[in-house]
Image: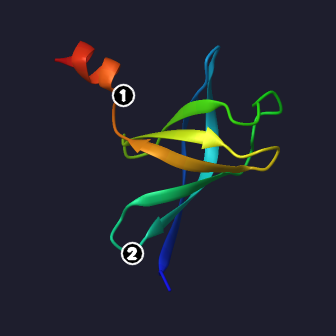
Amino acid sequence: MSEFVISTGTGLLVMTNREVPIHYRLHAHIGGRAVMIELLDRPLDLASDEHVRLVLDGGRELRCQVLDDTPMCTVVGDGLSDENASAAR
């Protein structure tokens, strides 16, 4: 059975059409890999299966996919997307 750590913070949720400050709860394996994000004040217009970016309060960026009409998102990527990484170089 995997063990998880949970931490909370305030970050920036980057959606297709806007950015909003948001409180989150990060569920991660003991090794530090984030697997789930709980959006504690989920925007009402966030669509099921929508892909968003969450910039954590420490500056780390996670790419996430919204799960149905729940406050949960699954982490599908860690760090900059390939396009953004190329542009940053």
Callout 1: 10 Å neighbours few (<14), some, many (20+)? some
Q: Which residue is mark 2?
A: 30
Going by the numbered disc 1, the residue's amino acid type is Ser
**Residue most toward the left?**
89
Q: Taking 17 as reference, is 12 above or below it? A: below
The structure residue drawn at horizontal position 26% and vertical position 13%, both measured from the top left corner, is 87
The structure residue drawn at horizontal position 51% and vertical position 48%, both measured from the top left corner, is 75
| Marks 1,2: beta carbons within 8 A | no
Q: Which residue is mark 1?
A: 81
User: Looking at the figure, which quarter contains the C terminus?
Assistant: top left
Callout 2: 10 Å neighbours few (<14), some, many (20+)? few
Q: Judging from the image, what secondary structure is the residue with disc 2 in?
A: loop
The colour scheme is rainbow
Residue 50, percent from left and from top: 66, 31
User: Of label 1 and label 2, which has the lower sequence position?
Assistant: 2
Q: Taking 6 as reference, is 84 above or below it? A: above
Image quadrant assignment for residue 52: top right
Q: CA distance from mark 1 to mark 2?
A: 24 Å
* Drawn side of residue 41 relative to residue 32, left or right: right
The structure residue drawn at horizontal position 33% and vertical position 20%, both measured from the top left corner, is 84
**How many numbered badges does the structure rendering display?**
2
Q: Judging from the image, what secondary structure is the residue with disc 1 in?
A: loop
Going by the numbered disc 2, the residue's amino acid type is Ile
The structure residue drawn at horizontal position 56% and vertical position 57%, both measured from the top left corner, is 36
* Drawn side of residue 43 relative to residue 22, left or right: right
Residue 1, percent from left and from top: 50, 86
User: Is label 1 or label 2 in front?
Assistant: 1
- Tag on residue 64? none
Most foreground residue, 60 or 81: 81
Residue 41, percent from left and from top: 74, 45
Residue 64, percent from left and from top: 54, 41
